Image (cartoon, rainbow, N blue to C red):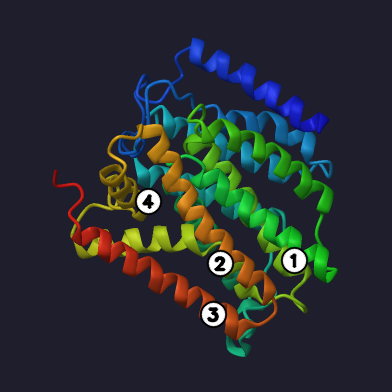
Amino acid sequence: MIKFILYFMIHYLINKIFVKKEFLIDQIETSAHKKKIVTNSITPLSGGFIFIIIFPFIDISQNYILLFSLLFLYILGLMSDINYISSPKIRIILQTVCILIFIIMDDLLIKSLSNEILDKILTLRIFNVFFLLICLLVLVNGFNFLDGINTLLIGNFIISLIFIYYASKNNDLILDFVFIENLLILFFVIYIFNFFGKSFLGDSGAYAISFLVGVIFINFAYKNYLFVSPYFIASILWYPAIENLFSIVRRLYSSNRLSEADNSHLHHFLYMYFTKIFFKKSNLFINTFTGAIINIYLIMSAFIATLHFNNTKILLLIILINSFFYFCIYYFLSKKKIFSD
């Protein structure tokens, strides 16, 4: 409780400073991605800054490689937020270099994919590194798409950590419970400010926190590979991953440049759909409502996956059902032509 109050007060003071200095979405020359996001002019990009200044006090193990990587990704995201590095290609290259160095220096590994052939391939270090690099790049950029809809991004982080915490507590799995508890306290504080539209994580926060969550899940899978299906991880983190991969396929199919931001993500469609339904409600209400609806579905999906954390067949079925449901909703909303008015 004391940590919660302390983090809340720090966030409140930082927000005051950000607002005073006008470090606000739509009042600075933000990236094209941010301009496509539904927001308002009094929302500071303070969420990521809160995380990066408090996290060193949470990381009691003092993993300096991790701290340096998070700081690098935060700065890279910040340069994107203020449109200093506007090229997506440059951001991807810098992300790749940072993540690759971390994987090699921290000896990050994945033990199994529950398939004999794939497991043999993973014994070759170069393939193991390449697989983890792709996974983390997809996750980091997929999560980044979600920022802008209130509670969607930070709520997804909270949901992910709560369910590996729950699975570990109830099944005697290996996890640093104190570390996760402290992270959740910080994330809940950020969630409150984001819920009321008083703070966004920005690219800076999205890059750093999504990378951290990815590393936590990879280490969790490595330490518990005899008891946990690797597809438990995929069933928890499926949404940002499919958002990213589908966006790439969609833009290639429509001959749009991958570097161009758009409003064709599922959460954008849902926001516009709810805008028409609740046309008398404020943008803040609709924004937060959209994030809440998606997160409620993710909670239900994650809960079912957690009940079957070691059953690969059921977890693969859950991922397939979630993907099918995603595409059905996307198709339905795209046919509504909700951006035409």
The residue under label 2 is 301
Residue identified by numbered label 4 = 267
Estimate how packed mark 4 is, as few (under 14), some (14 to 19) or many (20 or more) residues with alpha carbons within 10 Å: many
Q: Callout 4: helix, strand or loop? A: helix
Element type at mark 3: helix
Where residue 92 appears, x then y in whole percent? 43, 48
Which quadrant holds the C terminus?
A: top left
Assess disc 3: are there few (<14), some (14-19) or many (≥20) residues with their C-alpha within 10 Å of its C-alpha: some
Q: Quadrant of residue 165?
A: bottom right
Residue marked by disc 1: 167
**Quarter of the picture holding the N terminus:** top right
Q: Say above or below: 146 vs 138.
A: above
Q: Of the residues shown, which amino acid type is indicated by label 3?
A: Leu
Residues at marks 1 and 4, CA–CA distance in whole angstroms: 28 Å
Tell me how far mark 3 sits from mark 4, CA to CA.
24 Å
Q: Residue at x 57, y 64 (%)?
A: 300
